[in-house]
Image (tube, rainbow, N blue to C red):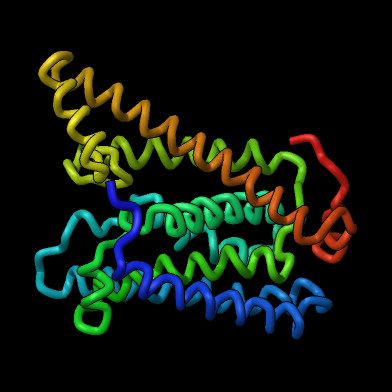
Amino acid sequence: MQLWTPTHAAQLLPCLAVMLVLAVLLRLWLGKKPLSVRIIPFQILAVIIVLLEIGKQIVSAADGQYDLYHIPLHFCSLFIFTMPAMAFWRGKGAEKVRGITAAFCTSMALLLLIYPVLIYGDWNINNFFVNYLDFHTVAFHNVVLFAFILLLALRLHPVSVKGELKATLWFTAGFCVVSSVMAQILKTNYANYYSCNIPPLEAVRVSLQGVLGYVPTQILYILIVSALNIGFVYGSYWFFRLVRRLLEGKAKDGVDIGNSEKEITV
């Protein structure tokens, strides 16, 4: 099972280096500004994410044969909702929205840095300037990676907020229900709920069908994928908190966004 290819390394590593440099420069420039100023780069990324997705939907529908796979029911599709919500929502529950977004951005960043082959293929990179859908695939996920870096560099979310972990897990569970049900109804592989993109695991799923039957196997498979999704988001939440604390220490730098940095039970 190949995690990286030379093509991924040639594309992703330079992009990551540029992101880190920009993040450092933005921190030096905006680091001591109030949240309303620090969050502007993140707001720009949120707008870009939405525009990229609108472009994908237009291109997919342009030839009159809309691809059901492009319905935003994938794990990555959640960013077209969570990032704008975090960027612009300031009403009730805004802190929990920031927590959800931080956990999901961390999840995507970890997946992209550990197993980029699962996120997009060499062909997407090679056709970046040729095909809009390939451009979208690469650009979309790299924008999310940059968003994760900015969350840390610009201190856009405090170390912890009361109730945010519970909200994050319920949000993830809700996504799992919707995505898994729609994957079976439309027979389309949203978030790996219809089949598995990892060849060794897909071979196990297929072999189990001959033993248990299709429906029991699929139910078991959906439960396992859901547990993995929830568990990974849970682990990503704590990873974000750990990195956030390591970068910032225990200084109370969250006062200006309406939250203290004291340890809060979640």
123 vs 44, left or right, is left
Number of labels in the image equals 0
264 vs 173, left or right, is right
Above or below for 116 versus 162:
below
Instruction: Give the quarter of the figure containing the C terminus.
Output: top right
Give x and y (percent) for residue 262.
Answer: 88, 47
Give x and y (percent) for residue 174.
Answer: 46, 38
Above or below for 29 versus 216:
below
Above or below for 69 versus 48:
above
Q: Quadrant of residue 238?
A: top right
Write the residue at 49% across / 36% down.
230
Of residues 63 and 240, the one drawn nearer to the viewer in this rendering: 240
Give x and y (percent) for residue 86.
Answer: 61, 62
Write the residue at 14% across / 14% down.
211
Give x and y (percent) for residue 19.
Answer: 55, 76
Q: Residue furthest top?
A: 211
Q: Quadrant of residue 246?
A: bottom right
Q: Quadrant of residue 23?
A: bottom right
Q: Residue furthest front?
A: 6
Write the residue at 76% across / 82% down.
28
Write the residue at 44% across / 38% down.
229
